[in-house]
Image (cartoon, rainbow, N blue to C red):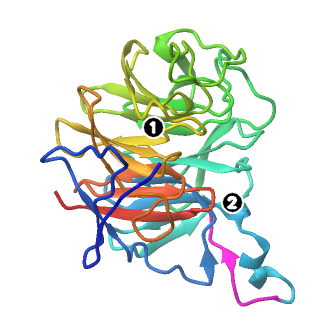
Amino acid sequence: MKHPYSLIAAGLLVTVFNSNPVHADGVPEFKVDPFWPKPLPENWMLGQVSGIAVDKDDRIWIVHRPGTLVDDEKGALANPPTTQCCKPAPPVLQFDAQGNLLKSWGGKGAGYDWPESEHGIHVDRQGNVWLAGNGAKDHQILEFTQDGKFLRQLGKPGAASGSNAPGGLGRPAHMIVEGDELFVADGYGNRRVVVFDVKTLAYKRHWGAYGEKPHDDKLAPYDPHTALPRSFGNPVHCVRSSNDGLLYVCDRANDRIQVFEKSGKFVKELRVEPETLQNGSVWDLVLSEDRAQRYIFVADGANNQMLVVERESGKLLSRFSRPGRMAGELKWVHNMAIDSKGNLYTAEVGTGRRAQKFLRVQ
């Protein structure tokens, strides 16, 4: 697929569209901030940036995978050092809106099971930081304070629990706290949304695609020209909430967003770039910052682009960015976040391995 594009050099205003461009007047537009974040201290380098979140004070949090640095990126760790570069940054980092590093922590410690492969991150209204992992044995979620003090663990590593096991997890991808409940996109192993009591971490309920009972039977590969499956694929990659009390779930491999009431009652589904095969189009989403949340911003990792979708109708309004590793381009955009001003933040895995900030300009 060809991607004609233009970049206004002075502001790096991204106006990138696929062939058959789509754009509607008045739709939000963005430009990349090429200087965000600022250089890291202590010769640190990021691995795959697998999660990104914005807290209530508009501070930006990322979780990355230190274990994904290759040998020539960590020569400074050798004894004696083989190169001046580099060493992995701590897994969890907090930045301000200007890109200054504020906090860093994470990794193995006493009393909890750090994931094999770091994945989602969420910061709740109380400021606590929730982390998950998608490694083969990662069936746990961890909760920490903002300073990295361990608070609680839900689940434990080991064998997969299955999509109908009440208390277990299956390589959870993402989670959010809403009121007194923890909603989990569960995930890379299981095929469901599961809900826990946030105070006690007790299991409350779960559901699969269309609000039905999930299953773990083998699924046929996604085919855009046949009926959509009654099951989520793997991974169930995100869960997000709206101001009007709905949940938006990323069924990544099936190129769709499913919308539910918090009870698990199915409301509707939105198809997104439905011809996409490979890794699917819906890797993550956030809702716009206006009170009505008119727009859904979608991270389309397979096509290396960002999408603006009308929330009510599911209509695709615009696309921006393109594949690449320059500022404003994307390589496997994996997760995203939005601040109170409508600026977007993205995290890239694979060989992208960075976080970027896209400033809202319209």
Q: Quadrant location of the C terminus?
A: bottom left
Can the viewer see residue 180? no
Locate residue 68: give its quadrant: bottom right
Q: Magenta segment range?
A: 81-92
In the rendering, which numbered label is found on residue 176? 1
Judged left or right of residue 254, residue 56 is left
Q: How many numbered dots are placed on residues in this image?
A: 2
For the residue marked with disc 1, what is the amino acid?
Ile
Is 325 or 202 nearer to us in this picture? Answer: 325
Reply above or below: 193 against 205: below
Reply above or below: 188 against 161: below
Q: Position of residue 298 (x, y in %)?
A: 38, 42
Question: Which residue is located at x 60 percent, y 48 percent?
Answer: 119
Q: What secondary structure is found at the residue carrying circle 1?
A: strand
In the rendering, which numbered label is found on residue 107? 2
Judged left or right of residue 307, residue 175 is right
